[in-house]
Amino acid sequence: MAHGASPVLGFDSPGDPSSVAAFASGAWSTRPEVVAPLLIVAGAYAVGWWRLRRRGGSVPGWHVAASAGGLLTLSLALSAPFEQLAHASFAAHMAQHLLLVAVAAPLLLLADPFAAIVWAIPSPMRAGVGRWLRPGAPLRRLWQGLTLMSVAWLAHSAAMWLWHLPTAYDAAVADRALHDLEHLVFFGTAVLFWWPVVLPAPRLRPQPKHGARVTYLVLAALQSGLLGVLLTLSPAVWYRSYPNAEDQSLGGLLMWGVGGAVGMLAVLILLGQYLASQDRASPTTEPSGFPPPPAPARTASPSRDTSSSR
């Protein structure tokens, strides 16, 4: 059924901000096709975490928290009520995309779930995973290519700009299957984008320099910020599905402000890691951050002076 089918969604027409009030009083509901895969992933992570603990391994608590936060964010962003709200308001639709791209994707990578997921696989199949990722394996080469910084940046940027073209955006709002495909592309390219920044396991290439990752994030923030500025300041409405100009400006402001803030937070974290690594690499540096004072000049001992005078 079309995503824009008003009898199912409960709204008179897409892009009607007055319909948002109806969402607030509506009953919470879920989409089985969204909830089922998320429950499977959560269950696999829990089983792998339990098996690791039984064998003496450990998963840091903050990894578990990041995993739970990422899965809950995905569940919220793709829930039926949020879909209804996104159908009514462009700003809500933008918030939905930001949850997928700027919150769920980096949280799930920060959880570093590879070890737990592998241990959730039955032991006869676990060796096959290792064969898929050994040097020279096709899957390893494919993932190395997709997570190359230049490829990931271009894929993420292209997905953002192409899906925000009026024809593509209106088509996604009008058809549920196409809208789900849009979300899948946004989330998939976001995983590719954040992979060289977060560097979760399996690590298939040497760690990029901090400067390269900072530049990567700044350039991404600039291009997404430009799109947000164009949406915010445009005197014309871009999308037939969302005819309210103020709603469009608010959505652009969310992309510009919230998206940029997440990118700059990641830049600050990388800069902090770089400064900490520099401190560890300089053992002569005092805790204050300044080098120690120079040692005093050595002077001749009195006994030597006396013997030389004789």
Image: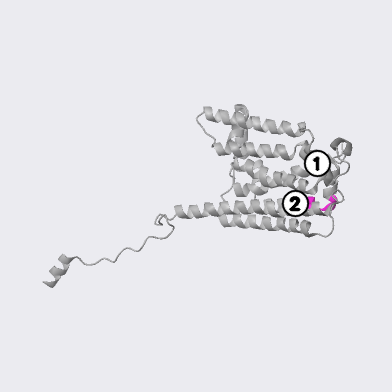
Image quadrant containing the N terminus: top right
- Residue holding disc 2: 160
Image quadrant containing the C terminus: bottom left
Instruction: Name the residue: 67% across, 37% down.
Output: 72
User: Quick check: 202 above or below 216?
Assistant: above
Instruction: Name the residue: 73% across, 31% down.
Output: 36
Q: Note whether residue 83 is visible.
A: yes
Majority secondary structure of magenta residues: helix
Q: Earlier in the sequence, mark 1 or mark 2?
A: 1
Instruction: Name the residue: 76% across, 52% down.
Output: 250
Q: Note whether residue 209 is visible.
A: no
Q: Amino acid at mark 2?
A: Met
Residue 200 image offset from top left, x and y in percent: 59, 43
User: Left or right: 52 with respect to 42?
Assistant: left
Which residues lie in the magenta part? Answer: 162-167
Residue 163 image offset from top left, x and y in percent: 79, 50
- Residue holding disc 1: 21
Q: Nearer the viewer, residue 257 or 58?
A: 257
Q: Residue furthest bottom?
A: 309
Q: Nearer the viewer, residue 11 or 54?
A: 11
Label 2 CA crowd tier, 10 Å (few <14, some 14–19, many 20+): many
The type of colouring in the image is one colour
User: Quick check: 241 above or below 176?
Assistant: below
